[in-house]
Image (cartoon, rainbow, N blue to C red):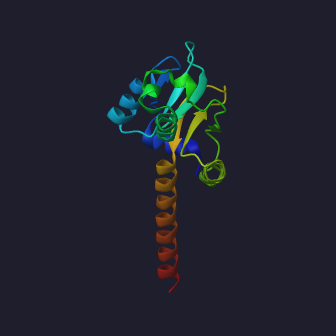
Amino acid sequence: MQVIQILREKGRDIVSLTSETTLSEAARLLARKRIGAVVVRDHKGALVGILSERDVVRAIAEESVAALARPVSAYMTRAVATCTELDTVDELMEMMTQGRFRHLPVLDDSNQLCGLVSIGDVVKTRIEETVREAASLRQYIAAAG
């Protein structure tokens, strides 16, 4: 299965903020939306980073509450791994495992941000694929017997 099919099911909504947003505001957004990461965009809408719960925890661990008043640009991941709509679930699982991250921004064929896929989306899709395959095998065995 490809990323484009995941996005068809989950939607293409992208929660984002600018690099000037404070870490405190970003943490509130993550909590309010019940999400694990937020995309950071410039004023033209281009992807410039990603801020995850891990980044927030790391910032507070290093600078205590003072970190909350600083901009997310101080803590966000700038070298963001991305995927395309044509990447497969298996490719995403490998990228996420090797890179040790749980969120991947999705770029369309024009290199524009068009979605965000989480490890939860990938696992859910993989489980659904496995269930479908098992059902197909049961039908095949039942028809052959």
How many labels sit on residues? 0
Quadrant position of residue 84: top right
Q: Residue at x 52, y 76 (%)?
A: 140
Name the outermost residue toward the bottom: 145
Judge by depth and name the residue closer to the eye, 33 or 70. 70
Is any atom of residue 113 visible in this view? no
Q: Residue at x 35, y 35 (%)?
A: 31
- In this rendering, position of residue 27 left or right of residue 73: left
Q: Residue 96 placed where, x, y %?
A: 61, 49
Judge by depth and name the residue closer to the eye, 55 or 15. 55
Q: Residue 10 placed where, x, y %?
A: 43, 41
Q: Is residue 17 above or below residue 5?
A: above
Q: Residue 18 placed where, x, y %?
A: 51, 19
Is any atom of residue 17 visible in this view? yes
Name the outermost residue toward the left: 32
Q: Is residue 111 above or below residue 57?
A: above
Q: Residue at x 44, y 31 (%)?
A: 13
Q: Residue 127 placed where, x, y %?
A: 48, 61
Name the outermost residue toward the top: 43
Judge by depth and name the residue closer to the eye, 65 or 79. 65
Judge by depth and name the residue closer to the eye, 36 or 11. 36
